[in-house]
Each structure stands twice: as C-alpha cells, then as structure tokens.
C-alpha cells in the first residue's frame, strides 16, 4: 500500500513539472506572436499614415501648380489680345502681371522674356535690364516645341539658380505667340525651393521623417526639394527598392528603405502629382514608428519573466506540498488502524453529545417560558402596586393640603417647611407612579402598527409644543427631512416626546440651545437621531442611561424620575429596533434609534 502511494505521488510531481514547462513555453510563444503582430501593426499603421499624408502633399502641390498655370494661361490670353490689337502696352502688361502675381504668394515673380530670351517685363520691381534666359533648358524646350501643340504646354524646369533672385528655384513656364502664331517668347513664374521646404515643415512626420519632391522617370527622378534638407538639388540618386517599385507602379506605392541622403531607414510612400512630371515622397522613420513598440516589448517580456518566476515558485511549492502530502498519507496509514479501533467509541460519544444537546435545548425553552411568564407577572404586579398606591397617595396629598390650609397659623416655620416637604415628595411620588404605570402599559399594550408613520409631522407637532412652552428665543430646533417609518404612531410619538423633552431640559442652561433632529434610510431600517448641545454625560455610564429609575444627574439639578429613557428603549425594542447614545460632559449628547422602513419605501 505504501509503495503504491509513493509511486502515485512521484507520478503526480512529474506531471506538475512537465505541465509548468509546457505552460511557460506556451506563454513565451504567445508573447513572441503578440510582439510580432504588434510590430507588424505599427509598421502597417506607419505605411497608412505615410500614404495618407502623401496624398495630402500631392494634392496640395497639384493645386498650387494648377493656380500657377491658370495665371500663366491668363497672361497668355492677355498677351495674345494685345498682339491682336496691334499694340503692346508695356505699363499695362506690367500691371496685369503684378495683379496676377499678388494672387499667387508662392511665386517669386511673373516675368516675360522675348523671342531672343531677354527678360523684358516683370510683375515685381526687380530690375530685368540685361537679364537673358536664352540658354535655359526650359526656354529652349518651349522655343523648340512651340509649333507642336501637344508639346507646347506647361514646362517645369529642373532646379536652377535664379539670375535675378540669386535663389534656387523651379521655373513654371509657357510660350507666347505672335499674331501669325510664331514663337514670341515665354511667360514664366519662378518658385523658390525654400517655399517647398517651408510647406513640408508644416507636416507632422516625426523628428526623423522626410518629405521629398522629385521629378518623375522622364526627368530621371531629379531631386527638387527635401525636408529636412539633405543632398544636392538636382541629384538623381534613388534607392533600388524605389526604382523597382515605381517601374511596376508609376502612380503610387509604399516601400521600406534606407535613405541615401542621411542613412536613416524609413517607410516611404510615393505619389504622382496628377499629370505633372513630379512625384512626392513621404517617409516615416522606422525608429520613430517603433518607439512605442519597444515599451510593449519590455512590458510583455517582464510579464513573461514574472510568469516564469511565479510558475517556478509555484511548482516548487506544489512539489513540496505533494511531498508533504505523501508523508501525511503515510502517517495517516499508520494512524488509520488506531482510528478504526476508536471509531465505535467516537460514535458513542457523538450519540451522547446529541442527547445532551437535545436536553439542553429543551431546558433552554423551558427556562425561556418561565422567564417570560415571570416578566409578565412582574409587569402585572408593578401595574397593580402602582395603581393601588395612587389611593393612599391621594389621601396623603389631600390631608396635607387641608392641614396647610386649616392649620397654617398654628404651625411654626419648621412645621410649614416639613409639611411642604411632604407635599413635594407626594407630588414626586405621584409622577413616579404615573411613569411606572406608563412603563408597565408599554410592555402589555397591543401595538397598532401603521404601514406609514410621518416622522416629519410628529417631530413638527412636538417641537412646536416645546417651542411654545419655552421662554425666550434661546431654543432653536434644526430638523432635517426624515424618512417614513412603520410602527405604532402613538408609541413612536412617545419616543420622540421623551427624547426631545430631555434635550430641552438638559440644554436650558445654555445661552443658545440647539437641538438637531435628523435621519436617513439604510439597508433594512431607518436611522434617526436627536442631538443637543446640553450638559452631556460621561460615556462610562452609558449602560445605565436606559435602565429603570437610572439617573446621571441629581433631582435638584434636573427634574425627572428616570423612567423616560427606559420607556424609549422598550418601545423601540418592541418595534424590532435598536437605541443607543453618545455624549461628552459639557459637549451635549446624541441619541440614536432605528425603526422599520415604511411599507413600499425600502431601498
């Protein structure tokens, strides 16, 4: 038997170890797959951002070139009109150029060169005297192709150093015709490379991103503008990935390559600028793109490492527990025979315990019935005694009054004082008997439970009576909204009368007596409280507060019989509630009690 148990536990330990190893391998594989998917997602998102940004760049440049071309066409038409009229109004033409130029903030100027290449007029104030562009490629192309309608449209030059501005510019130009259709010069608009660079700066491509404007394949992909500035304008060196992809897809595409200008690896997208011989490229740095991926690598790797450590620790604890369990089973096997021998004795003991418990429960029930009967008898006796004492007490009070009225002149001062003491204590005895009777009635009286007791109305009526009885404005009640309760309205009114009367009594020495009444609905019951700023009490005597005839103050300080709070406790307990108090000497007291929710108002 013991050998079989050892074999069983040894096999279980092996299963646990193998299971933990497989779990760790699974978690590591899961982390690797998740990181690879996240890596791919970051790169794909960067490619999408690059494409979307590039479309915006291409559309923006296309729109600006369209505006420039519209201005060039407008000048063509104006020039043709003047030629057809047989007059060339130089100042008027200059004004027209200036007007068109003002509408195009991206151009450096609008200028006209004659058929020999001499710049004759411009829309700006720069001097054009002696300036010739006869050797410029764009001039020669337009002059050569003027008669060919298909080839005489808009010409965009390579980057050239402007002979008037001294800046690197791109020239946008169209040819001008004589009245007979012959070549009569060109209208051209230079746009600085710096303008393109400034436009690219506004794009959010990250600290290592790049935006490039190049010519298309017909121009050998010459570099026209770049942000950040790197490389020489006009150079035609491009990556093999770009060359291979644009050959297959000349309009647009996405690829990843290391830029030759600054040796930074980027995710590029390229986009043709409409039908113009231009291409825009937007590149997002791979390093910037993966900057948010690396924290995921660290976090998931750390989680995997923690998981491995925890599983290793857990495995060690499990193996240790299994070994301890195996040892325990061995010990149990040794003890099992002794337990079998002791089993009959245990069953006999259990039977005896069951019998004794049944006897104890029966005796408790009998003692409870006896106690309840004794309590009822005591209450009936208290009621009877209190009721029977009223007759002789009335006789004492009546005879002492007659003695005071008929023999006042025959009694000396001490006799009158003693007679007054008798009458005063008779009155106190009467009040005490009334309170005892009331206390007894509260234990025997049938409850007239109401589904809904308006606590606000009861408190309002009682405080109005107490306020009327109080002398002066020194008494102030602060009453919050109280939840509806369930119970005997008359009994609950008695609780409030006793608590509020006590609060008024024990605050009468204050220059400003403040009594606060509040309450709130809680789970299963309503909580109410009466708080005052009176003389308070010492919390070490709190258990005596609700006892019969218990008083914490002398009768010559505050009147009372010590029955009021006992009545409060009895009424609240008959409603299934609780009552307690808190206070400090000289700082006032707060009395709390609970009552059931009104029907239908449970929360």
Image: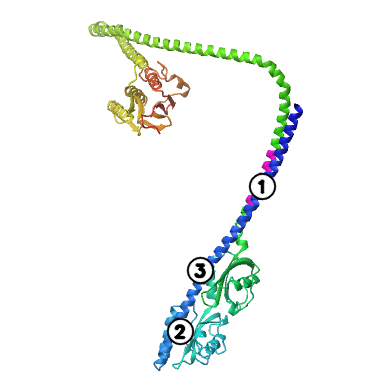
Residue in the image at 40% along x and 93% along y: 87
Magenta residues (range): 298-315
Distance from the alpha carbon under mark 2 to that under mark 1: 74 Å
Q: Residue furthest left?
A: 406
The C terminus: image quadrant: top left
- Which residue was labeled with disc 3? 56
Q: Which residue is mark 1?
A: 26
Q: Where does label 2 land, which residue? A: 123
C-alpha distance separating marks 3 and 2: 31 Å
Q: Nearer the viewer, mark 2 or mark 1?
A: 1
> Could you classify mark 3 by the number of other residues whose Cα lies within 10 Å: few (under 14), some (14-19), or many (20 or more)?
few
Name the N-terminal-most of marks 3 and 2.
Answer: 3
- Dot placed on the residue nearer the N-terminal end, 3 or 1: 1
Q: Is residue 256 magenta?
A: no
Q: Quadrant of the N terminus?
A: top right
Q: Residue 218: percent from the left, percent from the top?
A: 58, 79
């Amino acid at each position: 038997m013991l050998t079989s148990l050892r074999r069983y536990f040894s096999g279980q330990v092996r299963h646990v170890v193998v299971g933990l190893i497989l779990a760790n391998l699974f978690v590591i594989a899961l982390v690797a797959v998740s990181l690879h998917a996240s890596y791919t997602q970051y790169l794909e998102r960067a490619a999408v951002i690059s494409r979307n940004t590039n479309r915006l760049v291409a559309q923006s440049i296309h729109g600006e070139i369209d505006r420039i071309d519209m201005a060039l066409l407008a000048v063509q038409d104006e020039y043709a009109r003047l030629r057809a009229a047989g007059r060339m109004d130089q100042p008027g033409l200059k004004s027209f150029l200036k007007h068109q130029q003002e509408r195009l903030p991206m151009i450096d100027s609008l200028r006209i060169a004659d058929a020999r290449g001499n710049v004759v007029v411009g829309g700006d104030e720069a001097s054009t005297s002696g300036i010739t562009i006869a050797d410029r490629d764009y001039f020669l192309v337009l002059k050569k192709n003027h008669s060919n309608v298909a080839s005489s449209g808009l010409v965009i030059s390579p980057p050239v150093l402007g002979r008037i501005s001294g800046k690197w510019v791109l020239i946008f130009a169209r040819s001008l015709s004589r009245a007979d259709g012959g070549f009569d010069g060109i209208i051209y608009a230079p746009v600085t490379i710096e303008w393109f660079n400034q436009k690219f700066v506004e794009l959010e491509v990250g600290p290592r991103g790049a935006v490039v404007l190049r010519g298309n394949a017909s121009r050998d992909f010459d570099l026209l503008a770049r942000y950040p500035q790197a490389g020489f304008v006009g150079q035609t060196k491009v990556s093999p990935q770009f060359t291979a992809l644009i050959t297959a897809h000349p309009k647009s595409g996405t690829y990843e390559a290391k830029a030759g200008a600054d040796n930074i690896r980027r995710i590029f997208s390229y986009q043709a600028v409409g039908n113009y011989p231009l291409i825009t490229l937007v590149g997002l740095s791979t390093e910037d793109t993966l900057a948010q991926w690396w924290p995921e690598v660290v976090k998931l790797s750390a989680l995997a490492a923690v998981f491995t450590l925890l599983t290793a620790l857990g495995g060690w604890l499990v193996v240790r527990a299994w070994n301890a369990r195996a040892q325990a089973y061995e010990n149990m096997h040794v003890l099992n025979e002794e337990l079998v021998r002791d089993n009959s004795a245990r069953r006999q003991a259990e039977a005896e315990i069951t019998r004794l418990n049944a006897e104890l429960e029966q005796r408790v029930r009998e003692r409870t019935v006896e106690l309840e009967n004794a309590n009822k008898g005591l209450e009936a006796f208290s009621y009877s005694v209190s009721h029977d004492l009223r007759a002789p007490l009335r006789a004492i009070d009546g005879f002492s009054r007659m003695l005071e009225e008929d023999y006042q002149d025959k009694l000396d001062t001490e006799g009158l004082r003693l007679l007054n003491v008798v009458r005063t204590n008779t009155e106190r005895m009467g009040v005490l008997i009334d309170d005892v009777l009331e206390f007894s009635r509260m234990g025997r009286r049938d409850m007239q439970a109401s589904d809904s007791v308006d606590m606000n109305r009861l408190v309002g009526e009682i405080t109005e009576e107490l306020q009327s009885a109080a002398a002066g404005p020194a008494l102030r009640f602060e009453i919050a909204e109280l939840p509806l309760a369930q119970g005997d309205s008359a009994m609950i009114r008695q609780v409030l009368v006793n608590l509020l009367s006590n609060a008024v009594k024990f605050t009468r020495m204050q220059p400003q007596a403040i009594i606060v009444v509040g309450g709130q609905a809680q789970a299963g019951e309503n909580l109410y409280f009466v708080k005052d700023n009176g003389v308070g009490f010492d919390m070490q005597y709190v258990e005596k507060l609700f006892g019969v005839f218990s008083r914490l103050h002398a009768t010559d300080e505050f009147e009372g019989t010590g029955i009021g709070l006992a009545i409060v406790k009895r009424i609240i307990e008959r409603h299934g509630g609780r009552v307690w108090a808190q206070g400090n000497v000289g700082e006032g007291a707060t009395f709390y009690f609970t009552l059931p929710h009104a029907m239908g108002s449970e929360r």
